[in-house]
Amino acid sequence: AGGLSNSLLPEPLNAMGWGPVIYFDAETNKATQRRRLERIAGALGLDDLPPVFYRSLRPPLANYGSLIRGYVAEVGAVFAVFDSLTFLAGGDLNSTETSVPTMNVIGEAGEGCTKLAIAHHGKAGRENGARPSALGSGAFEFKARSIWVIRKVNDEDSDHIDQVWSQTKGSDERLHRGFGLRLSFNEANTS
């Protein structure tokens, strides 16, 4: 997609197929996400923006099942991002009446389409050594096929961002070894 090499991505992310991405958003707006995509593409030296289609959704996600399946099929998406469960769920996050229908819609978004549901863990999970839980109801995690926890581990005033990625659940295969990423930016914050 757009000249980006799979070799830039750590395992298992480099094993995913290439093709259109659809981004379902309940937190920001199309202009914000476009600006972010332009910065990422510029930083990677891409001449063209990758094929990312944007759709704004308002909660609850459970009301949009057929619409989401239609969008995924229409663009032939191989990857769908749901940002974020906290806002998309649109109900009591501790309730299975909210979590199960939300996760069903994500799971049924399309055959052959990898789904990424972004969730914010509580403040208690940010402490070193803590094993954070994504949200209140266990059904959010029980229905997930794989869970990755991403932690920012550098100081706030740093000129770079260090992340540690750890897989905590892998239902269909072995757990992948964790990895770290360092994101450094130039003075203009453009590359």
Image: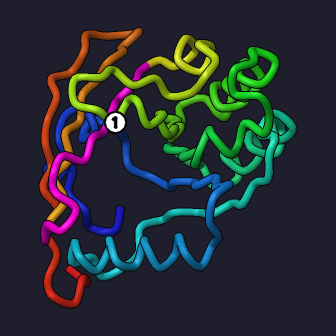
Protein image colouring: rainbow
Figure disc tally: 1
**Nearest the camera: 41 or 18?**
41
Give the residue at the far bottom of this rendering: 188
Q: Mark 1 belongs to which amino acid?
A: Arg
Which part of the image, by quadrant, shows the C terminus? bottom left
Q: In which quarter of the image is residue 146?
A: top left
Give the residue at the far right of this rendering: 63
Q: Is residue 134 left or right of residue 72?
A: left
Residue found at x 43% / y 73%:
36
Percent x, y for residue 74? Answer: 70, 52
| Residue 147 is covered by the magenta coloring | yes
What residue range appears in magenta?
A: 146-159
Percent x, y for residue 167? Answer: 28, 23
Residue found at x 22% / y 62%:
156
Q: Quadrant of residue 176?
A: top left
| Residue 125 is covered by the magenta coloring | no
Which part of the image, by quadrant, shows the N terminus? bottom left
- Report which residue position mark 1 lands on: 126
The secondary element bearing badge 1 is classed as helix
Residue found at x 81% / y 18%:
97
Residue found at x 47% / y 34%:
121
**Nearest the camera: 177 or 76?**
177
**Nearest the camera: 59 or 73?**
59
Q: In this view, does 116 lie to the left or right of 102?
A: left
Percent x, y for residue 181? Answer: 15, 49
Q: How crowded is mark 1: few (under 14 residues within 10 Å), some or many (20 or more)?
A: few
Q: Is residue 190 left or right of residue 7?
A: right
Percent x, y for residue 172? Answer: 39, 10
- Say above or below: 180 vs 47: above
**Nearest the camera: 66 or 148?**
148
